[in-house]
Image (tube, helix red, strand yellow):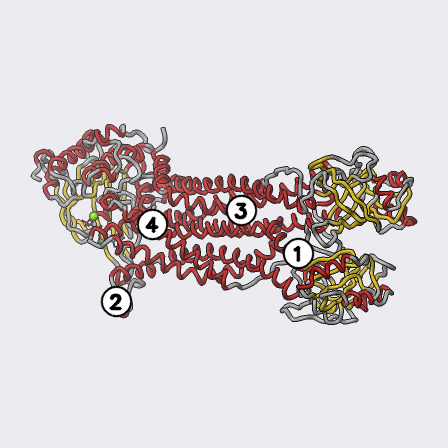
Amino acid sequence: MVRPLDRKLLRDLVRMKGQAAAISVVIGLGVMMQVMMGGLVNTLDETRATYYDRYRLADVFAPVVRAPNHVLARIAEIPGVASVEARVTGSALVDLEEDALPVRARVVSIPDTGVPRLNDFYLVQGRVPSPGRGDEIMLLNGFAKARDLVPGDRVDATMNGSKRLFRVVGLVESPEFLYTTAPGELVPDDARFAVIWMRRAALSAAYDMNGAFNEALVGLSRGGSADGVKAALDRLLDAYGAAGAYGLDMQMSNRFVSEEIKGLRVTSAVVPPIFLAVAAFLLYIVISRMVQAEREQIGLLKAFGYSSMEVGLHYLKFVVLIAILGAFLGAVGGIAAGRATAVFYQSYFKFPFLVFQLDKSSFVIGFLVSILAASGGSLFVLRGVFGLTPAVAMRPPAPADYSGTGQMPGWARRWLDQPSRMVLRRILRHPGRMAGSVIGIGAGMALSVTTLMMMAGFERAVDLTFDEIDRSDMSLTFVTPLAPGAVHALARQPGVQHVEPVRVVPAILRNGLNSYNGAVDGRVEWPRLNRVIGAGVQPIAMRREGIVLAEPLARILEVKVGDSLTIEVREGRRPVLEIPVIRIARTLLGAPAFMEIEALNRALKEPGRVSGAYMSIDGNQRDRLISAIKSMPSVAGVAQKEDARRALVELMNTGPGATRYIMTAVAAIIVFGIVYNAARIAMAERMRELASLRVMGFTRDEAGFVLLGELAIVTLAAIPFGLVWGYYMTFAMVAGFSTDIYQIPVVFSPQACGVAIIAVVVAALVSGWLVKRDMDRLDLVAALQTRE
Amino acid sequence: MDQKDKPITAFSVRGLTKTYGEGAAAVHALRGVDLDLPKGEFVVLLGPSGSGKSTLLNILGGLDRATSGTVRFEGQDLTKMSEAELTLYRRDHIGFVFQSYNLMPSLTALENVELVTEIADDPLDPAEALALVGLKERVQHFPAQLSGGEQQRVAIARAVAKRPTVLFCDEPTGALDSTTGRAVLQVLKDVNETLGATVLIVTHAAATAQMADRVLHFADGAIREEIVNATKLTPAEIEW
Ligand SMILES: Nc1ncnc2c1ncn2[C@@H]1O[C@H](COP(=O)(O)OP(=O)(O)OP(=O)(O)O)[C@@H](O)[C@H]1O
Ligand SMILES: [Mg+2]
């Protein structure tokens, strides 16, 4: 037999189904975020690891100028090396007729027969080039898709100075090229960088590498030390022009992917807990008021001789059931949403498959937090009720105390009609409850404000980067650093208005144990086309005596203005410089370091050299300029700002930033859930009073006014509170969303506030309407007949 | 069964006071009650509204605490009992019918009775208890589907079903017509006689006093007059 108390529990649940559902949804969404993000991050991590493992991605990469094949056997003998592969790689330009600008490409060899021992590829479409067919190539799938290329198409490519026609036979994905950018660019753009695979014999012929290789790939044995192997490789390959072996951790694609997943992990550590905390807080408030309304029944049960323990357990069961229901829905939703987002990110990260993985701790946290918040809310009230004797508990709470706070000032008595006075009295009489509602609605609103301000932050990041910092129209990279004459030559091209030279050299920046593998960007004293700006947006000048670091870089290296930095240049003579930090610059893209261009050149003992340039152009002459540049053999690549801008927006909308849309939607639902709950509870608490009003002859609308007037006042009071709270919460949220590639600024956005206010007001109107509808249907007799 | 001629005291009350609130706003609901109630008696408590009848019932029933004085039930002092002891006292000995019926709205009539029989040692069958108050046909109805009098009868069945040692009824017949009122009183009488329960009834209907063993007149928080009836009427004989 079902015990009568349990039956009461089930009936009460059914009776309060609307409210129980609203509560479950709120806490469920908090749990959903937690489970979704945890599952997403774990899935991406696991997928990446599995992908790397299955396609045998190398642990160490050792580029050289030219090493004879027999060296390979000696590499294999290095302790800790489990497998080796030699290959030939080179840079190339792909000429697509549809586009005036050639696309930069990397060419990679595959063995003449069979598959690579390391850095295998996944064939998406078509086939592998036939052995001995030097004109057959495979293309990176992402590039092919962006350019509408399919197996069977022909493309022109310039390799090592000579242009040839190739036939595309296959499209592939590779764990080595999940993220590809043209050298010197930061934001990936599938359309503007290609990877080409071809048989080694053909490639060796093109790059004059017969009997030799220019990159060794090494797989470590279990427990093998990457550092030891790198050092041994550098020693062994020194004679062949070693450029320095590097580990997977420094490999460009992997670093990007790792950073993005790390960014998502930070987001998942920071953002869902905020949602969960807000949801838990609401659960606490709602549950405590729900239990409060049961006060008389609690007293009655105790009068029968039920112990506090038994009564407490009964109500705990009740609220924990709601909490678990919510957490369960949230967990199920979170698994589904986690899978859906993982599928979304699968194409972003270009994984050929996904290994779904849940985050067990997120379930534990989600369920625990829900249950604790719910039981906390009920225990808090139960403790109070148990402190009362059953006789007192059974009385309707505090019916008499209209004296103190209920006293109306004279003006209120004069100007307010009776229903308005009832609204005001109730608010004055239950300041605690009202504060709870205000905080609850404010919290939901804060979530909306935060997510919306974050949206504004994303937009601001793009605007700052491309309107305030980069004011050029086009940037250009030379094949090798050139003499200053190159700049003058550019300035004479059609449509060019202004040219600003840059010298970028790859370098490792070090401060003690902190290091960053990046580049030093040499700029003219007062950059105008691509500016360096300070914490405001004021431009910063380059000075000869020191280096200017971007704020995120200063953070990574843990340096401040005045500290000295070690810079190991990875180009030319490879000097090691000791340079003081003179300014911290604000950047939203990447983590660059700036020096005055001539100071940099002098340190390299290469005066006057330029590796690229920013240009402002006359838009009408763009086509003429492009065809002119196309005929300049010294130009390795051209980037148009509009492409870069589009690519960044795309990155923000498809990368980790994409989750902001989900979060905004969830925040909106939570806001609605909260407001609806507040209205619902107010109605439950006043059922009898409202029924009495109706019986006394008040119209539906007058009775509704008494109920909804309160909701309106609480909502209005919550708005300023939610705005302030939301603004401060944005700082935490934005930190979670900023990645190594881009940073999101905190922007106080009046529009975001406006939208959030509208959202809350609409939620209040809809909730008010729903509750009013129920109230109009209220069975007056039933409401008055039974005493609860 | 108790011997009426050798009464054992159920309640022994001395100097009982109860004050609500403090200072100027203090309400002295009980101003020193002295009372001995023999076990197994049928007692009626009369008095004007606000005189403290419900307050006394609540304290005797272990629902509320006294401000001062002692209440002994079968030798134990209720005023010194812990919360847990009071709970056991209520569970094992007391049946309560409240002035406002206080049914659980989400439980049916039968389930409301089961709520109490569940934690009782040797209860009546809940359906039988409801049959006793003439509600056999309404066991599956919810309180909202019952009239005020029917709700009151469910409350009585609920109090009776646990076979209480003491049954407190706060105006059990206030909402009832004469026929049902008499039937309810007959039930209370039966409980008193067949189960040997001490029954204490608060009522405004002075005629009810005619069926009592003992009548207490209450005014201003104290007992003003105590009458032991030599002859008692049956409920059927009472003028309504
Ligand atoms: N919780 C309380 N707080 C303040 N005063 C109270 C409280 N409960 C009862 N009183 C006051 O104590 C006095 C006695 O109340 P009690 O309920 O015992 O009266 P009663 O004799 O049962 O009256 P009635 O016949 O109307 O039920 C009344 O004046 C009442 O206002
Ligand atoms: Mg009373």
Q: Amino acid at mark 3?
A: Met
Question: What label does residue A742 carry, if any?
Answer: none
Depth check, front residue: B75 or A388: A388
Name the mark nearer the viewer: 1 or 2.
1
Give the chain of mark 1: A
- Distance from label 1 to label 2 (Cα)? 67 Å
Q: Looking at the image, can residue B59 be seen?
A: no
Q: Amino acid at mark 2?
A: Arg
Is the residue at mark 3 from the same chain as the one at mark 1?
A: yes
CB under 8 Å between discs 3 and 1? no
Secondary structure type for disc 3: helix
Q: Looking at the image, can residue B51 be seen?
A: yes
Q: Residue under label 3, please give it.
A: A33
Q: Amino acid at mark 4?
A: Val
Give the chain of mark 3: A
Q: Residue under label 2, please give it.
A: A413
Q: Residue under label 1, please give it.
A: A643
Q: Is residue A256 above or below residue A360?
A: below
Is the residue at mark 2 from the same chain as the one at mark 4?
A: yes
Quadrant location of residue B104? top left
Ligand 1 has an atom within 8 Å of the beta carbon of the residue at disc 3: no
